Image (tube, coloured by chain):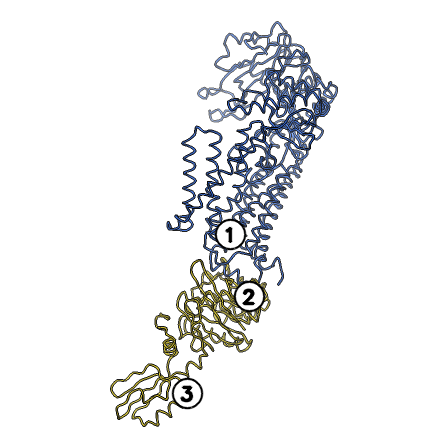
Amino acid sequence: MIKAEQVTKNFGSFCALKEMNCQIPKGCIYGLIGSNGAGKSTFLRMITGVYQADSGQITLEGQPIYENPAMKAKIAYVPDELFFLPNASMKRMATLYDSLFPNFDMKRFNELTATFRLNPKVSVNSFSKGMKRQAAIILALCRKPEYIFFDETFDGLDPVMRNLVKNLIISDVLENNATAIITSHSLRELEDTCDQLALLHQGGIVFESDVQNLKTSLFRVQVAFPFDFDETLFSELEMLNYNKKGSVASFIVRGNRETAQEVLKSKAPILLDILPLSLEEVFVHEMGALGYAFENELN
Amino acid sequence: MKQIINKGLYKEGLKQTALVAVIYFCIVELIGAVVAFSNVSYAANQELNNGSVEKMLIDGIDFNPLYMLSFALFVPLMGLVAFHFLNARNKSDFYHSLPHKRKTIFVSYTLSIITWLVVILAITSLTSFCIYFLNARYFSIGFQSIFTYIFTIFSASILVLGAGLLAVSITGTIFTNIITASLVLFLPRTIMTLFVMTVQRNAPVLSNGGLGLISDSGYNLVFGFAASILGISSGDIFTEVNYGIYSLILGVIYIIIGGILFSLRKSETAGSPALSKKVHAIIRISLSFFVSVIATTVLFNNTESTVTIIALYLISLVVYFSYEIITKKTFKTIPKTVPALGILAALNVVFALAVVGVSSTLLNVNWEVDRIDSISISYQEDMYQSPSYEDYLMDDTTIKNPEVLNLVSELLTQNQEAAKIEENNFYIYNSFNHIIVRMKNGKTYHRSLYLSDEDYLRFQQAILKSEVKESVFSEIPEEVGSISINSMTQNFTEEDTNNIYNTFKEEVTGLSTDQWASYLITNGTLSSTLPYVKAMEMAEDTTQTITYSSQNLPSISLSGYYGVKKYQSIYTISPDLTPKTFSLICELGNTNSKEEFLSYWNAYQENGIQYLDYDQVPDSEGGLSVYGINFSGYNPDTNAIFDEYYNNSNALGSSFDQMEPILTALDKALQNNITTVDYSKPVVYVTIDAEKYVVRNNDIYITNSERLCYIVNLDPKDFPQSKYQG
């Protein structure tokens, strides 16, 4: 488990993380979403052992990570700003990692470079942005890590590669019981990969939930009756964002879908549609309930 | 994972610095080989032309002058390349995410740089040694000096590396890396040097080296090297083992501190001027103190230079604020830096107070003779000349003679009182630049001693009667690396040189200590410790001999090592003290050059003094053209000397007629194969300048230009009149 307790990190007068708390269970694919400057990268650097918290504690399996080579060896981290050794080829990077990481799998490295069609012998500097990102992902996954941290990793990848990488991550999680944290500022990227999602805002987690639960806990209802009605007709339901135009009402319901459907049918509507919400819409409404204007957070 | 060094990181460090290392290796190897082959070529040419060669002494810097680039350029470059990741966030984050302690990264990369340094020094030294060994007959290898040189170069490189590593550990940009490393390397020693200079100005009785380690800029080899380039200090610092040891220890301390700071450093410091605001302020204040302390020094040394002093203080303020603007890239932080100017001012005040305090202490020593245990006279460093063997013997001699100690007590007290009077000008007096005074209470003082001519004579006479007599004037060098004979006649083979040296040794051994002492002093052999001064001529002591330089007497030069220090002693061959040696040199010189000199003489007799006219090409295919003759000589009866040179333009001058008897005597000597010279009679050196030429396609080509000398005796009545008296 990755655990952060009251973690604070400042850079001069700027507070990047403020008394942040979270727990990420083992074997989870955890999505961390937030706008620029929210603290996503800072958080990842702290659980990678690059930064040290000014106060609070971050632990991995109950142990601190900073200056802890044993823990660091279990981590594969792909940052937003990539770095490769000067004029190094993938092969040279792999050779270095092989000497530094005890589980580095050179065979897997050769397989993945072939799969991604990257030449391991040429300088990485000659690669395009997308190819560099692919190279970084390959080098990270070949360490057979127990913890995979990707910071806005899907940027620069084409859709085909994006899917390929997602499948690799899922495969590693399933096979090795690895834990992955993926950050992004796009919910769409994380929607079909992550188990859990959290929203980071101004240095703290403001919302956290299971993805499946998010998708099923809220749904949109469109209903029409032959008689005049208002929202009091639906008082048995937990309703969000009620809207009526003419004789058609549209609203968001939180709760069990089947139960809600039965309740509505019992009122003999002439029109009844129950529609799923996109994750983005779910976030907007959930954040709205918490008092945040979600559109502003994600743009 | 509890490792100090990681093989993968170490190899990576080697790879990253490989380019710089290879360039460094190529340059140093090439120059080392070129220097060695040039020396071989020169020696071989000498052997070819002269039939013999005097062994060339190969020591320290001669071995490979470009080793200086190790610490001046290549090691700092390698340090910057290896640790450049500390200056960019993404690079720094990468390294700090690796599964190793920070100290492992630091140690592995540092060791990779040191590996290159050691390997390159070893391989390039081996190459040079091989070249010299293969041509060993031409060279005398000063192993001790060379190994000391290599050791000091290594030490200087470690010092620079340490300063660089300390700097990169606390700063986060290239600019601040370089500034901070420079401050670490140069600021402490600059302060010490300025402090000592100012104290010496206020208390001129203090000798160079008088304040121990802080007086001697050579202990920081890098600073000492820079100072020697600027002419601030002298001496061959790279032959001093002590300097090497000190610099190495200092460098290691810097590396250790750098390692500790590296481990504590936050990755986010990358790209920032410094670890924290406090560190940034310290660097800023230190940089401007570097300038302001110069102003404070000038204030002490010359209060009339008001404009210079104000200008320097203003410059230090400009440096102070400029550094802030350059590093922070904004003017907004300037107001916040103003309060720290108080610290800058305080540092200058502390410096000034320290100068006053130390100067006062130096000028209030009790020099009562009962408190003095012994003294030594130390040699004066000279950029252009090594001390003599005898200077080193003097330096090693402890003098307890009561008369000497009484004099020292008296003179030091006088000097001290005179120094307290500001107007007193010491520079008109004779001086012993470095006297070491050991007190009975265990303290040791280093002083310069200033004496009038009379006092100097008294002092010198007392020293000559002291322990110095036996320790300095009873031997000539045993360890001799190179011998050369300097004479108007040349062409001495190695056998001749050894023969002359052995004869000289035998004759000198037979001299009394007084004779030898008197000779050495007037000959100037002890110029660094017991220089000859005019005062000697005031004495009535008849054992004195006059100076020899005007008599064109030959000399023998001995070079070698006194421990690890190079000496060079030049002994003029006095016909009074060493007549056999003098006669041998004249005879061997005449014998060796007679045949060739005869060809010059015949050319002169045939054509006189001529100057080749390129418009009037001779009919012959080639020949020898004499373009000048020099006559110089000494008459021991009248103490007269003369020196006249004749070429095409003045060959027929009236004074040339006086040379006719010389030409007759020369002719007679050559015809009768007379090679010996009796110095009790007037001696003349006849030196002929000639050119060998060939004629091709109606053009004259000069193939060689030479000068040869023959020495003959002259009848006293034929000795030319001269306006010079020896």
Three-letter amino acid code of the residue under disc 1? Ile
Residues indicated by labels 2 and 1 sit on the same polypeptide chain: no
The relative height of residue B584 versus residue A82 in the rendered view (above or below) is above
Mark 2 crowdedness (10 Å alpha carbons): few <14, some 14-19, many ≥20: many
| Circle 3: element type | loop
Q: Nearer the viewer, residue A237 or B3?
A: A237
The chain under label 2 reads A
Mark 3 crowdedness (10 Å alpha carbons): few <14, some 14-19, many ≥20: few
The relative height of residue B88 versus residue A220 in the rendered view (above or below) is above
Spot occupied by residue B652 in the image (x, y as percentages of width and height): 50, 10
Indicate which disc residue B170 carries: 1
> Which one is earlier in the sequence, the residue at label 3 or at label 2?
2
Chain in blue, by letter, is B
For label 3, the residue is A256
The chain under label 1 reads B
CA gap between label 3 and label 1 equals: 59 Å
Three-letter amino acid code of the residue under disc 3? Asn
Three-letter amino acid code of the residue under disc 2? Ile
User: Could you tell whether A74 is left or right of A258 in the image?
Assistant: right
User: Residue A95 is drawn in which quadrant?
Assistant: bottom right
Evaluate whether residue B504 shows in this view.
no
Name the residue furthest top. Answer: B717
In what quadrant of the picture does the N terminus of chain B appear? bottom right
Chain in yellow, by letter, is A
Q: Nearer the viewer, residue B448 or A275?
A: B448
For label 2, the residue is A65
The relative height of residue B205 versus residue A192 in the rendered view (above or below) is above
